[in-house]
Image (spheres, grey):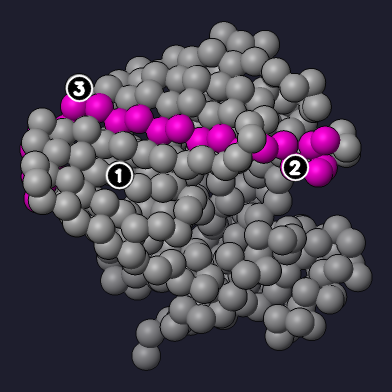
């Protein structure tokens, strides 16, 4: 009989409602046993609605619960290192929401702690596990567009009502996320690109705050180089008229196009040949990511998003923002 892993969630906020939390209940061999939130009423409400047996208002109590085997940290990124080090000390399996931590140095601290305990560590860059991007990776690996030369991504969106009202939002607090929505959103794409094209070895950029609606940066451009010699460029602006999300991978024989966030077809162009495939995301978008954690733990299959890969993504983001205050 295969082992059952009992999970606890630290920070059962909005991301855990549909995107991630239910996945830990649906994957065979996993059970969601407990949740924690500093507001005990909200923790109790989440537990009641999601049929979770236990709830806590204190993270230490959840971490040290002898029935809990593994912990998913779903708090804002400025607390990821604080909680992760506690989880490592307790020698429990861990998955951390993205970005792994606000700084590369914190990522290294986290990795060192888990390596010392020889305990598995994952980061919730779930796009590495989604079928639509596995299709893109298959096209690349099968040389469908020949030798790849360059990748470009443009992401932009209008300021939302919270931004315009200048209401506090941790995602745009420079003390928590220097790049604002860039840290929250661009991290997904940069991480995915390294999964598709290999590690980035050099990255730089410029960033500014054009709107003055919050303290973090709201307009960023970047360029980078993959270890293979493929060049990359990106632009991210969070004060435009409409949302755009377009990625182009240019090869010597064709082009692959897709959206990082939009559930639209992935497209391949090769001379006169064109393919357009619509590959639906699961209801709980982290489902395949969580299934791959189970496969890693039970079937000796390496998960595509680990503490090592998550840390390198933070290194790239940090370098793009490095010389901008």
Q: Earlier in the sequence, mark 2 or mark 3?
A: 2
Under circle 2, the secondary element is: loop
- Dot 1 crowding, Cα within 10 Å, few <14, some 14–19, many 20+: many
Quarter where residue 174 is shown: top right
Residue, x 10% and y 31% (percent of image)? 252
Q: Earlier in the sequence, mark 3 or mark 1?
A: 3
| Residue 303 coordinates in the image, percent (x, y) | 35, 57
Question: For the magenta stretch, what is the residue range?
Answer: 142-164
| Residue 279 coordinates in the image, percent (x, y) | 34, 66
Q: Quadrant of the C terminus?
A: top right
| Residue 46 coordinates in the image, percent (x, y) | 78, 74
Reading the image, the residue beneath label 3 is 229
| Residue 320 coordinates in the image, percent (x, y) | 50, 19
Q: Earlier in the sequence, mark 1 or mark 2?
A: 2
Decide if residue 41 is on the left or right side of residue 269.
right
Q: How far apart are the two marked residues, 2 and 3, measured between alpha carbons?
A: 38 Å
Under circle 1, the secondary element is: strand
| Front label number (2 vs 3) | 2
Q: How far apart are the two marked residues, 3 and 1, measured between alpha carbons?
A: 20 Å
- Dot 3 crowding, Cα within 10 Å, few <14, some 14–19, many 20+: some
- Dot 2 crowding, Cα within 10 Å, few <14, some 14–19, many 20+: few
Residue, x 85% and y 63% (percent of image)? 57
Reading the image, the residue beneath label 2 is 160
Reading the image, the residue beneath label 1 is 257
């Amino acid at each position: 009989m295969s082992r059952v892993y009992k999970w606890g969630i630290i920070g059962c906020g909005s991301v855990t409602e549909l995107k991630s939390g239910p996945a830990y209940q649906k994957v065979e061999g996993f059970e969601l046993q407990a949740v924690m939130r500093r507001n005990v009423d909200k923790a109790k409400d989440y537990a009641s609605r999601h049929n979770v047996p236990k709830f806590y208002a204190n993270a230490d109590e959840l971490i040290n619960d002898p029935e809990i085997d593994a912990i998913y940290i779903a708090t804002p990124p400025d607390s990821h290192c604080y909680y992760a080090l506690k989880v490592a000390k307790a020698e429990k399996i861990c998955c951390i929401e993205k970005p792994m931590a606000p700084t590369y140095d914190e990522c290294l601290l986290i990795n060192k702690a888990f390596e010392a305990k020889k305990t598995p560590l994952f980061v919730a860059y779930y796009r590495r596990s989604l079928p639509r991007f596995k299709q893109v990776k298959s096209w690349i690996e099968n040389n469908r567009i020949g030798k790849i030369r360059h990748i470009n991504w443009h992401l932009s969106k209008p300021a939302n009502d919270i931004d315009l009202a200048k209401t506090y939002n941790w995602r745009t607090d420079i003390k928590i996320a220097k790049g604002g929505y860039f840290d929250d959103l661009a991290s997904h794409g940069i991480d995915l690109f390294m999964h598709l094209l290999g590690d980035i070895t050099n990255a730089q950029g410029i960033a500014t705050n054009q709107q003055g609606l919050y303290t973090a940066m709201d307009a960023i451009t970047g360029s980078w180089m993959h270890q293979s010699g493929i060049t990359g460029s990106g632009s991210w602006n969070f004060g435009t008229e409409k949302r755009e999300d377009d990625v182009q991978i240019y090869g010597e024989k064709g082009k692959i196009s897709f959206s990082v966030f939009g559930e639209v077809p992935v497209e391949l162009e090769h001379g006169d040949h064109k393919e357009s495939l619509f590959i639906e995301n699961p209801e709980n978008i982290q489902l395949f990511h969580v299934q791959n954690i189970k496969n890693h733990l039970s079937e000796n299959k390496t998960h595509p998003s680990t503490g090592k890969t998550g840390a390198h993504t933070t290194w790239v983001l940090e370098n793009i923002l490095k010389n901008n205050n």
